Amino acid sequence: MNKFKRLITLPLFLIFIITNLYWFKSHDDISIYKQMGIVIASVGIYMVAASIEVFYAKNNRIRIRLFKVFVLFLLLYYLGFLCAVLFLDGFFFTRSSVHYVNKIPFNTIKKFFVTMRDENNLKAFGNLVGNAILFAPMGLLLPLWSKKFHNIFIFTFTIFVMVSGVEIFQHYSNMGTADVDDIILNVAGALLVFFVFKFIFFMVKDKLEMYFKDDDSNCSIKL
């Protein structure tokens, strides 16, 4: 079974690496939609390969270690993805030369809604949704990586600090815009996924802890 597993997972991990190398090298010539498709597809391939490795691990101790390694790598990958989106020119879109600061909560959000209502502007809708989902995966990755992020206050504070740090950096580096509404949308999106994760985790917690139970020490993985 172990050899058969490698015949599946190794090619999948290789495809993940090659796909991302292609994306990194050719991003200037690829539309935003194709870039998103490449990233989503490559992450999907990685998750399939990682799930196979974890599910067919020799014992629970190895399963726990593999799970932690795969989650950590996915977290680092997404942090790199965020850096590419937020700070590198040509990844998904060209950096705007226009710089402004909005310190009034919900001011930009209201303008987007007015634009959508009066002009039926899908770009405004895309900006709202894009900001809401940008940090949303953190609502899953951080709690999976460490049990301390199951605490709503620690999780919210961490996301708030991360997002605020990005906005402050953009403000002082004149890269793009610094907008308090971006913080609101980013944090709200991450919290939404966090609550979905907590609900699902609550429903299947007993089964997960039994599945990831350490064979030798009778300790469960700290999800």
Image (tube, rainbow, N blue to C red):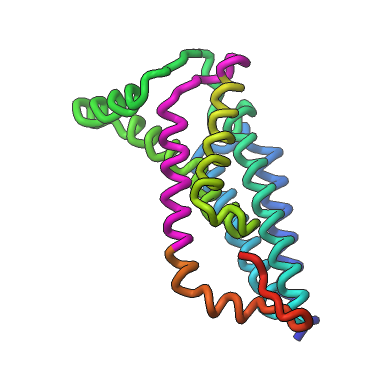
Magenta region includes residue 172? yes
Q: Whole-percent x and y of residue 45? A: 62, 62
Left or right of 55, for residue 32? left
Question: Do we see residue 69 in this rendering?
Answer: yes
Q: Can residue 4 be seen by looking at this rendering? A: no
Q: Is residue 128 left or right of residue 160?
A: left
Q: Which residue occupies 55% across, 48% down?
A: 138
Residue at x 54%, y 29% (from the top left corner): 164
Locate residue 48, reporting x and y percent: 62, 67
Examine the residues drawn in magenta and state their main secondary structure: helix
Q: In which quarter of the image is the N terminus?
A: bottom right
Q: In this view, does 151 lie above or below 223?
A: above
Q: Residue at x 76, y 76 (%)?
A: 61
Please provide the residue range marked out in magenta.
171-198
Q: In which quadrant is the C terminus drawn?
A: bottom right
Which residue is at a point 53% across and 14% down the rendered structure image? 97
Question: Would residue 90 appear left or right of 15 to someone viewing this image?
Answer: left
Q: Which of 189 and 16 is in front in this view?
A: 189
